[in-house]
Image (cartoon, helix red, strand yellow):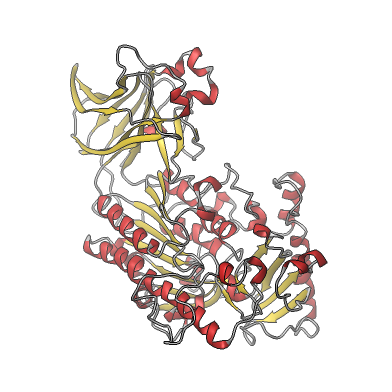
């Protein structure tokens, strides 16, 4: 599809033609067949809106829905009176064209190819609408939505529907529906107009309206993050318990990376790195009080700009909530209604994913799936719960925090039978996720003949410790049980199927790899990660350098700073010491931990023998330690303000190689 824009006094002009989309790998710079009306709306195209009038614009934030903000996505175009917004509805963040009555948005276009208009319409009632006076001539709070096509002086109503304002509640209420209508090809210039009219009280909006031409060979990307999944608890990584038969089957069609590393041993910073291609020292999200800089470019943002439908279906939010900035680039970022104690969240994510895939079989899409199913508390419904338990097991469910006395108890030892009990419950969550999330998604792709055209990535943000180094849970060390994660990639057409690579790669390599496979340039983004395709083509065989960081006192856990850095299979760890006050916090005191440690991961994968005093190559190790210490100094202190990348920090990052 070729898109050319012309500008007229009233609106932008669009030509929609035929686009030939390659089966699996589009040419660099090409777009799927899609036109986003949010992005293409110009100030001139806003024929009417209350926001054009000074009295409404003067209301400031009160003129817009509560908890909404101007979109910052790349390619979203002019702000157009602030009408292009990201609306956060507690469990969903969605892109909208804000259209309070009366609004009229106009586009002039040539439609040469039949396609579909896909959009939602909605009304929201919140504290800001309550302050607006209702139209006395239409007190019922009804808004009419219309889409009108005009050609040759003749108008045709393509869509017309009334929505009634929902009943008032304490916080806010919404009423919205989804629509998909055919848009026939037309000869000559046409005008497409989106109109809302009726009561001026409620806030009306259009949810990410698009025009798309069905694709016969779409390229899709599905990124699945199974939170807290250890690599060595996956069958294809050598685990002898049958917990991942579906992931293992996917691995036979894909590529297995035996040594993939995360950037942090806990959810928030690790996922920021996964979705931005940046180390923590670059994106500066270290603690539960941080959020992504809105200027940071995300994978979803780039995919959206290139015309992909973008959707996220994530667990109850937690540390991947939209409030941390994760919704940037996703047309819809949907969070489940459950919490960490929900026994069936993986199944719910699987069902939602299948439903969305079935609704988008003719469009290229990027789908991000996340579940906390494997995360503590370890809980799964029967028969999974008992699948690996011994008959004399003490616990049928286990919560590391609750059952060990809070964060103060993470260093409490358990008997070997109790440890086996805990691991069995953890493994049950993996098996449940394997069957209720991974399998349904794969089956849906096969059923709709999308499997061969879809890149499927299965990974995790971090692992979990089962007293490997004297502790439980995560976010307290940077040993491999916490930062080495599974990474399985099923490429389009199962390219490179069956291969295994032992060289070190990183989660920060996922974003550039996806862009590379999609034919989208990424070098100018100056990412810390790089595409894995050279590894697949065996043009690169050396280990990549990973950096894992942990700021101090995350979630008031009284853990000092930690940092890990490697040179090949030599891994150095910097451990800031516990203060006396921190030591008092714990029920059982942590075992002594060296301030500086060096492990040879080839000979000592369990990291039991610190060889810092007898390195094989003292000069190389000295350089590695020096870089680790210089990087460690850039981690912000807990009592300090959130750090920004100013000129001084930028220079330091460049000197250390974290900025190109």
Q: Determine the residue positioned at 60% across, 74% down.
A: 472
Is residue 349 shown to the viewer in this render? Answer: yes
87 or 157: nearer the eye?
A: 87
Is 483 situated left or right of 335 in this image?
right
Query: In the rendered view, does 129 fall on the left or right side of 58?
Result: left
Check the image and report above or below for 100 versus 475.
above
Q: Position of residue 573 (x, y in %)?
A: 72, 72
- Estimate the x, y position of residue 494 in percent, counting from the top left: 34, 69
Above/below status of 40 relative to 361: above
Q: Quadrant of residue 496?
A: bottom left
Can residue 542 be seen? no
* Quadrant in which the N terminus is drawn: top left
**How far from the left and from the top, in percent, is residue 243?**
40, 79
**Residue at figure coordinates x 78%, y 65% from the top left:** 629
Image x and y of residue 398, in percent: 50, 72
Q: Is residue 384 left or right of residue 646?
A: left
What is the tally of numbered marks visible in this picture? 0
Q: Quadrant of residue 315?
A: bottom left
Residue closest to the eye, 430 or 262: 430
At horizontal 27% and vertical 60% (from top left) the residue drawn is: 450
Query: Would you place residue 311 above or below residue 239 in this image?
Result: above
**325 w.r.t. 407: above or below:** above
Q: Quadrant of the C terminus?
A: bottom right
């Amino acid at each position: 599809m070729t898109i050319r824009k012309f500008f007229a006094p009233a609106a932008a002009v669009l030509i929609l033609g035929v686009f030939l989309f390659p089966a699996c790998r589009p040419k660099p710079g090409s777009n799927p067949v899609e036109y986003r009306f949010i992005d293409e709306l110009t100030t001139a195209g806003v024929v009417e809106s209350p926001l054009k009038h000074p009295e409404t614009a003067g209301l400031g934030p009160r003129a817009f829905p509560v908890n909404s903000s101007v979109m910052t996505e790349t390619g979203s175009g002019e702000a157009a009176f602030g009408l292009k917004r990201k609306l956060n509805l507690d469990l969903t963040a969605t892109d909208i064209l804000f259209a309070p009555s009366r609004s009229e948005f106009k586009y002039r276009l040539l439609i040469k190819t039949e396609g579909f208009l896909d959009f939602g319409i909605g009304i929201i009632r919140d504290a800001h609408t309550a302050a607006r006076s209702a139209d006395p001539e239409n007190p019922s709070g009804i808004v009419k939505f219309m889409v009108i096509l005009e050609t040759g002086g003749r108008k045709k109503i393509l869509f017309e529907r009334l929505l009634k304002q929902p009943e008032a509640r304490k916080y806010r209420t919404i009423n919205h529906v989804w629509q998909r209508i055919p848009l026939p090809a037309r000869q000559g210039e046409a005008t497409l107009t989106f109109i809302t009219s009726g009561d001026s009280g409620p806030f009306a909006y259009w949810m990410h309206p698009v025009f798309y031409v069905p694709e016969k060979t779409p390229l899709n990307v599905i990124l699945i993050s199974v939170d807290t999944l250890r690599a060595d608890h996956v069958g294809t990584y050598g685990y002898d318990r049958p917990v991942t038969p579906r992931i293992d089957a996917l691995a036979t069609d894909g590529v297995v990376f035996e040594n993939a590393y995360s950037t942090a041993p806990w959810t928030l910073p690790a996922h920021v790195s996964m979705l931005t291609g940046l180390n923590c020292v670059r994106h500066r999200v270290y603690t539960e009080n941080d959020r992504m800089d809105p200027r940071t470019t995300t994978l979803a943002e780039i995919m959206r700009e290139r015309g992909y439908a973008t959707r996220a279906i994530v667990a109850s939010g937690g540390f991947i909530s939209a409030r941390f900035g994760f919704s940037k680039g996703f047309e819809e970022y949907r969070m489940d209604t459950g919490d960490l104690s929900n026994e069936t969240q993986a199944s719910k994510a699987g069902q939602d994913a299948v439903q969305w895939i079935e609704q988008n079989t003719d469009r290229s899409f990027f789908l991000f799936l996340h579940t906390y199913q494997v995360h503590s508390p370890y809980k799964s419904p029967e028969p999974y719960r008992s699948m690996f338990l011994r008959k004399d097991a003490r616990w049928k469910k286990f919560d590391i925090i609750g059952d060990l006395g809070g964060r103060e108890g993470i260093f409490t030892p358990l008997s070997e039978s109790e440890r086996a009990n805990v691991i069995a419950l953890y493994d049950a969550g993996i098996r449940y996720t394997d069957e209720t999330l991974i399998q349904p998604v794969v089956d849906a792709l096969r059923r709709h003949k999308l499997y061969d055209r879809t890149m499927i990535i299965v990974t995790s943000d971090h692992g979990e410790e089962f007293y490997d180094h004297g502790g439980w849970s995560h976010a307290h060390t940077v040993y491999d049980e916490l930062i080495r994660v599974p990474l399985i990639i099923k490429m389009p057409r199962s390219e490179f199927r069956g291969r295994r690579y032992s060289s070190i790669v990183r989660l920060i390599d996922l974003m550039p790899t996806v862009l590379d496979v999609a034919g989208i340039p990424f070098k100018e983004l100056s990412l810390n990660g790089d595409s894995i395709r050279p590894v697949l083509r065996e043009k690169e065989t050396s280990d990549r350098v990973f950096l894992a960081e942990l700021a101090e006192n995350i979630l008031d856990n009284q853990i000092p700073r930690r940092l890990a850095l490697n040179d090949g299979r030599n891994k150095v760890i910097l451990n800031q010491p516990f203060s006396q006050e921190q030591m008092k916090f714990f029920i059982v005191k942590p075992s002594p931990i060296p301030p500086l440690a060096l492990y040879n991961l080839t000979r000592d994968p369990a990291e039991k023998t610190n060889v810092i005093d007898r390195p094989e190559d003292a000069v190389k190790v000295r350089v590695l330690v020096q870089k680790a210490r210089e990087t460690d100094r850039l981690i912000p202190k807990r009592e300090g303000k959130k750090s920004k990348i100013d000129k001084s920090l930028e220079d330091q990052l460049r000197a250390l190689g974290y900025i190109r």
